[in-house]
Amino acid sequence: MTSLSNKGLFLIFGLIFCQVWAYAQSDKFYTDYYQVKVNGQAQEVYYGRPGALLSTEISEGTNQIDVQYPGEILEVEIIPQLAHIEQEIQGNVLRLEVKEACQFFLKINGNYVYPLMVAVEQPIHSPPKATLTFEAGVHQVGELRLASNTRLHLKRGAILKGTVVVEDVHNVHIFGAGLIHGSAIAESSGRAGLLIKNAREVIVEGISLIDAPHQHMVLKNAEEIRLRNIKVLGNRELRMGDDALEIFNSKGVKVTHLISNTRNNSIAFMSENEMPSQDIQVDQAVFWKGDYGNVIEVGYLAEGIHLKDVSLRNIYIAHCLAGAAVAIQGKEMKIEGMKLENVQIYDSRLMLYNIQLEESCQLRQVLLKDHEYSGAIPAYSVFQLGRPENAAGFSMEGISYRGNVVRQLDDLYVKSWDFDWNSSLPALTP
């Protein structure tokens, strides 16, 4: 059996190590790598280390987005593919005509190192009356703790440097087109950009989170949480994990329209106690993940994780450099009803599915349904199943790998040895 050479492994992990220890905080908030006009008006593009972010509102009818690239545009890939977007290339300018709200990644000339994350949104209808408002500009907030019955409005252009904590409270609404920027958070603090803990009835919509040295959003022992139209842009140079969303022991969580580009996990289910995470719904999410962790991660370092009635559907994995697209791993894991449905994987370089079930795992009605991998580059490993005797209750339906329908589980035990890392893990940041 062919394998990567020791020299190749040394190069890969050496490059990862160099990136990991290169982290330095930055107060750079905008980039001119991509210059953008929306309906003829120049608009700022947020700077991130794994990419850039354009967050814009649209009006009724057709909206025109002009993206100027630093060089001639030869090819364009919109991920996921959206039929309602028309495009035209004019030298180094890409013109998009957009009629509907949507979230997608823009990859120009095959540039997976610095993609443009685009969030095109309708204005928030009937916003609540704010009790706390941040206008456009940079605000040093340190640790901003919100009380019960707070309506926090982050206006477009508002940048909060620090962390926002919603803990031991209820009835909180965070909304607007501003962002929470993690560059002021000490890497050793372990603090998230947004922490919702022991809280209930919390709505977060429209905001962006950028450059958190740890997790961007964390839910712990939270109930009745709504996350809508959220954008997350992480940091490839961090030592720690910059997960987009972690869910611990929470229930009644609904996430719709989430887009993220992080080095680490896109969405992770974790555990700190015996209380299950239950009634969790994630719908319409677009993920781009770098060289660590997994896109969808269940368990891993968490023992005794308990999930009940969890649904993820309409998930679009634009890019996964390392780790797995879907990972279910752990000891003493108990899952009662989990469905991952309609998952489109456009590019996953290392592994698609990694199912590792250690001692005392109980899986009931765990279903992966209607998944398609269409990557031009074959995945290095398509499917791994550790301890299959613990996989009773786990099933897959409607799985397609590069145009081939998988009709039985054994067909997924496939290796692709023409693996291509594009020669390196580049750390280019404009």
Image (cartoon, grey):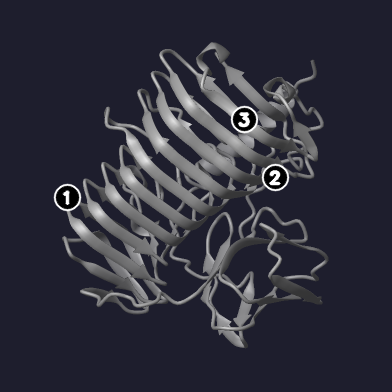
Q: Residues within 10 Å of mark 2 (few under 14, many from 20)?
A: many
Residue at left 58%, top 34%? 368
- Residue 366 visible in the shown view: yes
How many angstroms separate mark 2 from mark 3 (CA)? 20 Å
Type of amino acid under label 3: Met
Residue closest to the eye, 85 or 50: 85
Front disc: 2 or 3: 3
Residue closest to the eye, 46 or 352: 352
Question: Callout 1: helix, strand or loop?
Answer: loop
The x, y position of residue 79, in whole percent, is 67, 57
Type of amino acid under label 2: Asp
Type of amino acid under label 1: Asp
Residue closest to the eye, 37 or 361: 361
Give the number of the disc on residue 396.
Answer: 3
Residue bearing the label numbered 2: 347
Residue bearing the label numbered 1: 168
Residue at left 80%, top 19%? 2
